[in-house]
Image: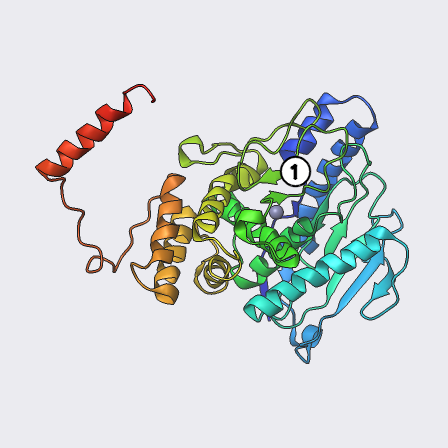
Amino acid sequence: MGTIPHNFICGVIPPHILTRVAEHTTDEASGSARTTLEHMRELATSRAATLIERPSAAATAPASTRKRRNVYTANHTLRLPGKLVMSEHKTRGTDVEVNEAYDGSGSTYDFFAQVFGRVSIDGRGMRLDSTVHYGTDFENALWNGRQMVYGHADGRIFVRFTASVDVIAHELTHGVTQFAAALGYHGQTGALNEHLSDAFGSMVKQWLLGQTADRADWLIGAEILGPAIDGVAVRSLAAPGTAYDDPVIGRDPQPAHMRDYVQTTDDNGGVHINSGILNHGFYLAAIALGGETWNVLGKIWYVALTERLKPEADFADFTQATVDIAGELYGHGGGVQRTIAQAWSSVGLNVPVIGCTAEHPPVPRPTKRAAAVARLRKSSRRRPAR
Ligand SMILES: [Zn+2]
């Protein structure tokens, strides 16, 4: 079935946080952060990560429509997948990380299956494998192109990496993106890749909790930040740049608008940083549309991810795709399409809405009477309150 280029490993803890911990602490946390950074680099350059095979017919044959999950333990070694400790329909044990890895991958599977009719990460029933207790001081969780890998949190800066379902769903969505659009992982393309994982990660949590857009926390990794850290999560879609501000892990660097786009060579060109701009546009559209995010917005994002994006897609390609799909599914020039275009515009991404000229003639210039009314309103605002 051939191979697709895949030269990235995304951990839930982005490199700018690990670098900060490595440089600004003197205890074992610094050593763990350094080890984690080095190991992430090794994983990204290893053969396993650079050439991820699309599943061969044998690997998925016959294409399964059943949910299949395996959870392994590496027993604090770097061996993958490790010893099998849990699989579908087996009795649960007492290891919280095993149970959370099992449940989180199941919730993500169920979300994609029930909302979009997608059978597993590859769309062909791929078994979802997870390994917990990976290494002794590997502080991250990641999708390595084949399976989920969870390191060991120190309990102080980070608690269990399996604790946030949106983190598990974020990582598994990298798998969906790998099989669906094979998006790259650098610059705007990489930030788009990150955004898709945050958007679907957040939607899985909202779907699981039955939350409408206005009730959701719009946070990624709220449950994994440790008690010693001054922050609420790893990222915030509602307010990028505000998730944490702490002497150990530093300050959330995410922008929420194109005017603050960060040009950097770190982090594959700021993929975990500039994703904040798309994240915030997504959030604004969800709030403006109201209701269950996965129903309308989720469907548009899913069609973009699985049918429209080319491997090198940038912000303009993606925002145009979402506006086009909104028109196709919910009416050209309709409320959904205009809401999404407005949300993108609010974060500095202007998308021409094609095909709605007839429905929306140019806004007439204000008449003399309208101008007079506007002046009156303005002057009345200056009056002291009664
Ligand atoms: Zn990621």
* Location of residue 41 in the rendering, given as x and y in whole percent from the top left corner: 68, 41
At a point 42% along the width and 52% down the height, the residue shown is 318
* Quadrant of the rendered image containing residue 13: top right
Left or right, 131 with respect to 372, comes to: right
Residue marked by disc 1: 233
Left or right, 280 with respect to 250, comes to: left
* Location of residue 19 in the rendering, given as x and y in whole percent from the top left corner: 68, 30
Q: Is residue 353 above or below residue 87?
A: above
**In the rendered image, is residue 195 in sight?**
yes
Asked whether mark 1 lies closer than 8 Å to ligand 1, one says: no
- In which quadrant is the N terminus drawn? bottom right
In depth, the one of 228 and 178 nearer the eye is: 228
* Location of residue 317 in the rendering, given as x and y in whole percent from the top left corner: 39, 52
Amino acid under disc 1: Ala
At a point 70% along the width and 55% down the height, the residue shown is 48
- In which quadrant is the C terminus drawn? top left
